[in-house]
Image: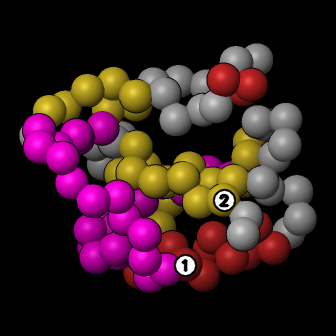
Amino acid sequence: MYLVSYDPFKPEAKSSPYQSASPIFVHTTECDRYSGSEIPDQQIRRLLSVRAFDKDHMMTEADVLKGVELEKKAKEMLGRGNAEYIHVHNATRGCFAVQIERA
């Protein structure tokens, strides 16, 4: 695995004050992209930082929670109507983990 810097924001979010690079781990060999509908075990067992952003890439809400609470919290954040997507980070090391988007 490699540890590299990655900016999870889309190019149109360049004006967001929250835009920043985060560390991520990348496999050294090709692997399948996750395509399941369940939250992967590696997210469930971690302490997570969860940040919701609106269409203008401004943060609308944030929380730190146990991974087992992620699904419920993501539904709440996206259910409020103003959040378009959520960034999930490992709360202790800061690594970017996943982006959750409205279906």
| Residue 87 to residue 28: above or below | below
Amino acid carrying mark 2 in the image: Glu
Seen in the picture, residue 12 relative to 51 is either above or below; the reply is above
Nearest to N terminus: mark 2 or mark 1: 1
* Secondary structure at numbered mark 1: helix
Residue 62 visible in the shown view:
no
Question: What is the secondary structure assignment of the residue under circle 2?
Answer: strand
Q: Does the magenta segment cover residue 40?
A: yes
* Farthest-out residue, top: 15
Image point (11%, 43%), residue name: 29
Asked whether residue 82 is drawn in magenta, I would say: no
Q: Which residues make up the magenta segment?
A: 24-52
Q: In the picture shown, does residue 32 fall above or below 57?
A: below
Q: Residue at x 33, y 24 (%)?
A: 5
Give amino acid for label 1.
Glu
49 or 103: nearer the eye?
103
Can you tell which mark lies on residue 101?
A: 2
Q: CA distance from mark 2 to mark 1?
A: 12 Å
Which quadrant of the figure has residue 77?
bottom right
- Asked if residue 21 shows in the view, the reply is yes
Q: Position of residue 50 (x, y in %)?
A: 55, 56
Task: Please report the residue visible at 81 percent of the width from the left and 73 percent of the height from the top.
Answer: 79
Residue found at x 40% / y 43%: 96
Mark 2–mark 1 CB contact (< 8 Å): no
Please say if 28 is above or below 49: above
Number of numbered callouts drawn: 2
Q: Tell me where residue 72 appears, x and y as whole percent.
A: 60, 81
Name the quarter where the N terminus is drawn. top left
The residue that mark 1 highlights is 71
Tell which tag, 2 or 1, sits nearer the viewer: 2
Q: Residue 81, located in which quarter of the rendered image?
A: bottom right
